[in-house]
Image (tube, rainbow, N blue to C red):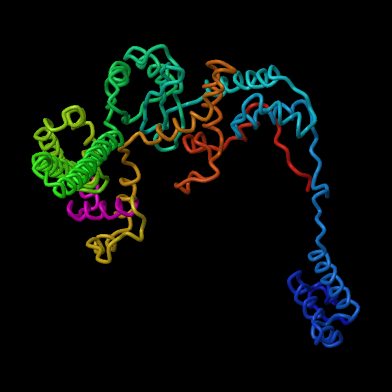
Amino acid sequence: MMMFADESNGLVCAAKRLSPENRKNLALKAAASDARVSDLAADNNVSRQFVYRQKQKAQTALDEAFSGKHHDEEVLFYLPVTKKRIRQIVLGLVLICHSSFRGVVEFMRDLLDLDISIGTVHNVLMDAVEKAKAVNAAERLENVRVGAHDEIFQARMPVLVGADADSTYCYLLSQENSRDGDTWALRLMELGDKGLSPDYTVADGGTGLRAGQALAWPDIPCRGDVFHALLDMGRLSAYLENRAFGAMSALEKTEAKMIKAKRKGRGNKFSKRLAVAGQAETAAINLADDINTLAEWLRNDILSLSGADTDTRRQLLDFVIESLRQREHLRPHRIRPVRVMLENHRDLLLAFALEIDNKLIACADEFNVELSDMRQLFNLRASERASGPDATCDHNPCEQLEEKSDAVNQAVQGIVAGVVRASSVIENFNSRLRCYFFLRRQIGDGYLELLRFFLNYRRFLRSEHPERVDKSPAELLSGNSHPHWMELLGFKMFKQAA
């Protein structure tokens, strides 16, 4: 075998210095019919026997690839199955896979040839509930900046829900007999003992929820949730649009009847009916168009993150409310509830805009820049957050401002990220909870403690927010890492042998 000199190690075998990639390329060249082994050996400073071995490896790999044989029966690794491992699998099936108790029994019987009872599954879950309660009781909530509150129903019983808007950490998940102000106040005061004192909360128009917070936290404001306002306005717009399409369809049918009647010389029979249908169509289309325009203003100008100052938004919202009032007599059962909601919650819905104004004024004073330039930059960054960087315009009116100081841009980015307008985190949390409501029939009210623990300490596999990936809500809230949620329940995670 040919050798070459190395200044530090002396003579070293050239073949051993070849990387796996180089060995692969050498094998491919040797397998080619027009390649001479002796030439390849000389070019790489290796022996011909070494080249022949690489060629044989390549040929063996090709034979295996095209042999049609599969290795499904090959043992990849061994899993030690103990009673504790069985309990761990039971928890994983129920919480990760949303499996029913009977599904767990069937899985164990069919895949592991193990007979367990529904009672055993119940006992495993109940043991986890007690351990989860201990973990939940030790939580500290000083880091919650904005709370999002809501009420959902399970078996006709209200469930009070509260979560941190930034980390999505759920600090309240309690089934109650009532959702009145006293019940909310009691639960919020209990959370206050754990350090919960947010800057503000966001919630819908629930009277008991707001009354309870006023009792427990009189100095903490509860802002309006723009999600529900936009949802109600959108539903009204969709309803009126469908009514308009219905009026158009009715006019077309009347016109068809009119044509048939004219052929028989009875056109006068439908003339009045056709006129009425035409008027109804015009009125329905005009009303639908008007409400749709108001809904777009509400969504894109008044309650959007980017936009004008609070006073301008308030004037626009007053105009929308008055416009609804003027058309209320046309569809009172549909328009009036939306108008009343917007009127009663006007200042609560615009509280986020006042926060933006105050922060922009503070930043303008701190960096000695014009407030109008600061708002332009804020609106630009807010639009990017809503639509992505590709949606920005070619002309950037804030280029000079950005060039002046990167700190200004970072401060504006912080304002954009810090403003919370809706309790969307609660709506998302509620949708995840509904996948587990079957547990209430099996393990009782304690299932909420287990779910709160699981959803708080389970790490996100994916998220629209990159900073949340591979982190749990508990880690995002506290800033500290913690063991896997299974390990917090006393189990040891399985690792394949190296």
What secondary structure characterizes most of the magenta part?
Answer: helix
Q: Tell me if residue 234 comes above or below residue 51 in the rendering.
A: above
Residue 44 percent coordinates (x, y): 80, 82
Residue at 27% x, 31% y: name it: 224
Asked whether 56 falls inside the magenta stretch, the response is: no
Judged left or right of residue 329, residue 199 is: right
Q: In the picture, which quadrant includes the N terminus?
A: bottom right
Judged left or right of residue 162, residue 331 is: left
Residue 315 percent coordinates (x, y): 11, 40
Tell me which segment is drawn in magenta: 362-385
- Of residues 150 and 306, which is closer to you in this image? 150
Judged left or right of residue 230, residue 329 is: left
Question: Does the rendering let one see residue 486?
Answer: yes
Residue 445 percent coordinates (x, y): 52, 16
Q: Tell me if residue 123 comes above or below residue 402 in the rendering.
A: above
Residue 53 percent coordinates (x, y): 88, 73
Residue at 22% x, 39% y: name it: 243
Residue at 17% x, 49% y: name it: 259
Judged left or right of residue 95, residue 305 is: left
The tally of labels here is 0
Residue 283: quadrant of the picture: top left
Residue 28: quadrant of the picture: bottom right
Residue at 38% x, 19% y: name it: 188
Asked whether 376 falls inside the magenta stretch, the response is: yes
Question: Does the rendering let one see residue 298?
Answer: no
